[in-house]
Image (tube, rainbow, N blue to C red):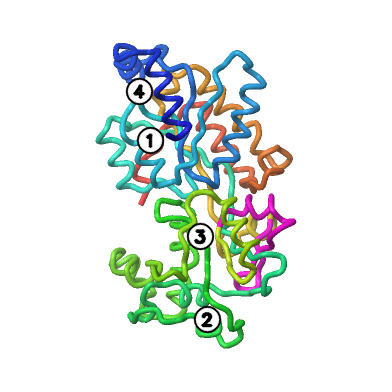
Amino acid sequence: MSRYVQALAAVLSLAGAGGLAACVDQAAGGGAGARDQITAVGSSTVYPFTTIVAERYLADAPRARPPVIESTGTGAGIKLFCAGLGAAHPDIVDASRRLRRHEYAECARHGVDAILEVQIGIDGIAFAEALDGPRMALTPADIYRALALAPGGRPNRARLWRDVNPSLPAIPIQVYGPPATSGTRDALAELVMARGCEVVEPDTVGLQERDPNAFATRCQRIREDGAYVDAGENDNLIVQKLRANPDALGIFGYGYLEQNGDVVRGVALNGVRPGYATIASGRYPGARALYVYVKKAHLRAIPGLRAFLRRYAALWGTDGPLVKRGLIASPPNVQRRAATIIAGEIALDPRELR
């Protein structure tokens, strides 16, 4: 049983069925909820940053119950978050990509129709190898040819990196990466695979706007024959696998690369290595925004949730502890907007989503 489920079961056993109903009512209309513990689910990339915020929040409020933070992956976390209001449902979802319009619609269908969208910083999808690895240098086109289910509309038969590019080494294509429920996997498809597809197959340029489903099938589906290995939501496990298999590559958020620089190094994409400056400037092809989404109704119902968000805003600056852990600070104007959303409890306009 996960830590989130265990903690939630303990809360509900104390609150009882009546307490749960009260929290649902109060979450919709204000007042103190039956649950007095902040809960968050979602991205494994954002997880360590939210954990640091939880530690600092507790330092400020030692009598508060410790927040329960679970790494479920962005997609799975959004499903939990959108399932409803009240004590049975998390207050926050960490996300390594932006919420999608159809996901917001699912939230709204369950009464979750007032959501704060807070960009906490920037991250990069880092391709990494062991320090004693082959010193790879790749392009999005190389990655598309290596990992796509059917590049050029034909089943992927590439077995060696040299099969996709003669300048690459004759070693097996073996990439450990996140599962389909992960925002990092989504970002891989959108930021890297899609770009590579448009280079290799120029006729796909503009297809994403005309027919998103056809584009996803042609350009973004990952092969399933063992060249790409779903390593789950545990990014530390990918680091361990790279140590055991130096010829393999791994994919995870830049923060894990930063924290494990004594074991792995970043692989350049288009001649640019993942690093703080290259991701912050957008030169690295895998740069992306990171978010937390918060139920506005729960700000009134869950003690400490407002203070928790204010603590997040106080820690995401350039010299703050989140950056020291591997977060890349947003530009000042993005930080100001995020802080304004927290202070004013400004709900997301779903028309901004796609």
Rendered image: mark on residue 160: 2
Going from N to C along the chain, the mark reached first, 1 or 3, is 1
Whole-number angstrom distance, CA of label 1 to CA of label 2: 41 Å
The residue drawn where x is 52% and y is 81% is 160
Whole-number angstrom distance, CA of label 1 to CA of label 4: 11 Å
Whole-number angstrom distance, CA of label 3 to CA of label 2: 18 Å
Whole-number angstrom distance, CA of label 2 to CA of label 4: 51 Å
> Which residue position holds label 3?
177
Going from N to C along the chain, the mark reached first, 1 or 2, is 1
Q: Nearer the viewer, residue 159 or 182?
A: 159
Q: Is residue 40 left or right of residue 235?
A: left
> Which residue position holds label 1?
81
Quarter of the image that includes the N terminus: top left
| Start-end of magenta stretch | 252-275
User: Nearer the observer, disc 1 or disc 2?
Assistant: 2
> Which residue position holds label 4?
86
Q: Which class describes the residues within 10 Å of circle 1: few (<14), some (14-19), or many (20+)?
A: many
User: Element under label 2?
Assistant: loop
Q: Which class describes the residues within 10 Å of circle 2: few (<14), some (14-19), or many (20+)?
A: some
Whole-number angstrom distance, CA of label 1 to CA of label 3: 24 Å
Type of amino acid at the residue the image marks with label 3: Gly
Q: Nearer the viewer, residue 194 or 242?
A: 242
* Residue 56 covered by magenta stretch: no
Type of amino acid at the residue the image marks with label 2: Leu
